[in-house]
Image (tube, coloured by chain):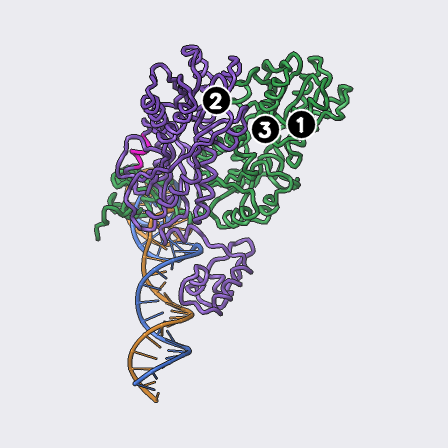
Chain colours: A purple, B green, C orange, D blue
DNA sequence: TCGGGTTCTGGGAGCGCTCCCAGACGGTTG
DNA sequence: CAACCGTCTGGGAGCGCTCCCAGAACCCGA
């Protein structure tokens, strides 16, 4: 038998030979299958260790039809994504949660039309076993395109106009907004404005709806109190400026994200309004590196991206393992973290 | 011949049969190899389109010994990473640049010790063709571990204590710092403090060195004018506070990152110092969503993460294609973008 | 002692692809 | 017309693994 040269990776066959057993037995030992004697198992594991063996994934995938990789798709315009801490949290959580179930994360950014074709082709290509898609906006063609694929998909956040037949894990955006605004109402505020997120996105729409309904329920008039921004700091600052301009007597504002709230805070303080005395501020996300760090620290609706990702991974794994969970919309609860800004 | 059921993915053999040619010819046509008649090529491409064929990557990798995937390793503590726009820029650039050379990005976060083993095992496992490692800190055991691997690695930023035999693409951190400080000196500032980054990282060390040397060259005394922080906003704010405390008469500060500069700005303005009249501020990174957006807009040392990633990918591709480029340290130039803060 | 189960093992087939090689074909040359 | 070239094609081997199956080894009670 020819000696395998140093730089060649040892194969299962090599390990088997070294351990003095057959390839089959070696495979069983390594994948701890049933019916392997303790003795053989020992020998195989020792051989694998000695030779520095690690299985060839391609060969394994070829027969198991599983790659052990999951795609995480972020389909948002670059600018928005760049300073969105929610995305970062999602990426990290995705990495961890997937690693915990033995999967690798393949990150995919998909904004432009060329991205779409590329993304679809890639997902088509059998590189991954499943896909997690985060917060697509309404106009996003991706969800529809994915519909036609043979790859299992789970959405994080409302999946555009696909309402049935898909797996979705979402936060209780409307409930969270209600919580926030109710808190302001209870504190006696009566001119409660809002800086909403882009209205082509499920989460933004729901948060705005929660704000509006709560005001109406409290007998307050929401007219003229809405400004839409794009989830960025600068956008939040601008929106706050135009609100102040239009509604100088506002005494509270519900901002649909922490990042926009940072911008709003800046505008408010340069306008000489004191927080929370003149204007109370409540935001959404309760990002650990943002909300508590502001001056004053922000009251914010708390959501845990990690929880969301975990639920998504769990659902995906159920699909992959053939347990065929019924497609449904899971709504995760949120809570209100009260700090000095309100 | 048995008809293949609907949900089964068509194989190359199916395409060949459909096109009325052999598997070999089909393969050649699809990979546009030489020696395929125009006629055959047509037929094969049409067949592939009609059947919705996409090649099985596992099978291909098995024989080509190429996976078409590149790992991007970010090895930094979570907190630091979360709001570091440089990382985000790197991720996006990595995604784009790799896509352009037909590779997929597999993102890997590696902070903890368990991460290290997991990461090494993964990279060992032949899942990826090469690795891009970003700004490891000095104590990071990862670069050493990677040394032993059979996978080509390119570092972005100084690779800990490995100085030779590795591929590195770095920015001219020292030169950038010199540019920044020289700019302050030329403007007549004489008490120029600095907020340095963590000194276990090459970039931070070099930036600090550039600051120090420029001061000395200008006949100024750097003593007591250094404060170290951790690249976060809050860290920058704290560092600025303690500098003001210690050196109340400082008239300029060179901050080693935009994010820290944002914190410093905040401290300065709440201390009632006007910028740039009382204190001039120059930072490093010139992040598009940060530096120009501040009040006042920040003068910052401009570096282009995309350029860095591009160079890294290029080097990696050269290695993968067997062109054996000599391991070396590429230094990318930086420039100074002057805005109102100085 | 023998059957009948359980435990364990090794060989063969095959996943879908690429690469190598032998040979067919057509066109040019001596 | 043979010899030769470049162009094109199909079949076979093989990448490294898992899975199936036949059979060996062993243990137990009848």
Residue at coordinates 65% horizontally, 24% vertically from top-left?
A: B240
Q: Secondary structure at mark 3?
A: helix
Residue designated by label 2: A233
Q: Do badges 1 and 3 share one subunit?
A: yes
The chain carrying label 1 is B
**Neighbourhood count class around disc 2 (C-alpha, 10 Å): few under 14, some 14–19, many 20 upward:** many
Start and end of the magenta stretch? A141-146
**Does residue B44 appear in the picture of this structure?**
no
Distance in Å between CA atoms under marks 3 and 2: 17 Å
**Neighbourhood count class around disc 3 (C-alpha, 10 Å): few under 14, some 14–19, many 20 upward:** many
From the viewer's perspective, tell me whether residue A297 is left or right of residue B206.
left
Residue designated by label 1: B174
Residue B262, image x, y percentages: 58, 23
Q: Are marks 1 and 3 in contact (CB under 8 Å)?
A: no
**Neighbourhood count class around disc 1 (C-alpha, 10 Å): few under 14, some 14–19, many 20 upward:** many
- The label on residue B234 is 3
From the viewer's perspective, tell me whether residue B6 is left or right of residue A282.
left
C4 in relation to B11, above or below: below
From the viewer's perspective, tell me whether residue A172 is left or right of residue A52.
left
């Amino acid at each position: 038998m020819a000696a395998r040269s140093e730089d060649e990776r040892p194969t299962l066959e090599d390990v088997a030979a070294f351990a003095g057993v057959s390839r089959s037995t070696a495979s069983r030992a390594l994948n701890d299958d049933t019916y392997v004697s303790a003795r053989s198992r020992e020998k195989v594991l020792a051989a694998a260790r000695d030779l520095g063996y690690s299985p060839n994934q391609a060969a394994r995938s070829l027969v198991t039809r599983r790659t052990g990789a999951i795609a995480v798709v972020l389909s948002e315009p670059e600018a928005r994504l760049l300073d969105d801490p929610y995305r970062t949290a999602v990426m990290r959580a995705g990495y961890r949660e997937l690693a915990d179930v033995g999967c690798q994360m393949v990150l995919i950014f998909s904004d432009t039309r060329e991205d779409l074709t590329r993304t679809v082709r890639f997902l088509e290509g059998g590189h991954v076993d499943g896909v997690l898609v985060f917060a697509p906006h309404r106009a996003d063609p991706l969800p529809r395109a994915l519909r036609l694929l043979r790859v299992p998909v789970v959405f994080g956040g409302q999946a555009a106009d696909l309402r049935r037949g898909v797996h979705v894990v979402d936060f209780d955006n409307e409930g969270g907004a209600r919580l926030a605004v109710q808190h302001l109402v209870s504190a006696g505020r009566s001119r409660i404005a809002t800086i909403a997120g882009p209205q082509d996105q499920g989460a933004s729409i729901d948060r705005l709806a929660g704000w509006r309904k709560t005001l109406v329920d409290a007998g307050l008039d929401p007219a003229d109190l809405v400004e839409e921004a794009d989830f960025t700091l600068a956008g939040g600052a601008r929106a706050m400026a135009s609100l102040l301009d239009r509604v100088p007597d506002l005494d509270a504002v519900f901002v649909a994200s922490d990042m926009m709230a940072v911008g709003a805070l800046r505008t408010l303080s340069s306008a000489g309004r004191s927080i929370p005395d003149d204007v109370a501020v409540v935001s959404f996300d309760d990002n650990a590196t943002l909300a508590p760090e502001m001056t004053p620290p922000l009251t914010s609706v708390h959501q845990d991206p990690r929880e969301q990702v975990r639920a998504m991974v769990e659902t995906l794994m159920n699909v992959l393992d053939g347990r065929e969970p019924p497609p449904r919309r899971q709504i995760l609860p949120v809570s209100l973290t009260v700090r000095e800004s309100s």
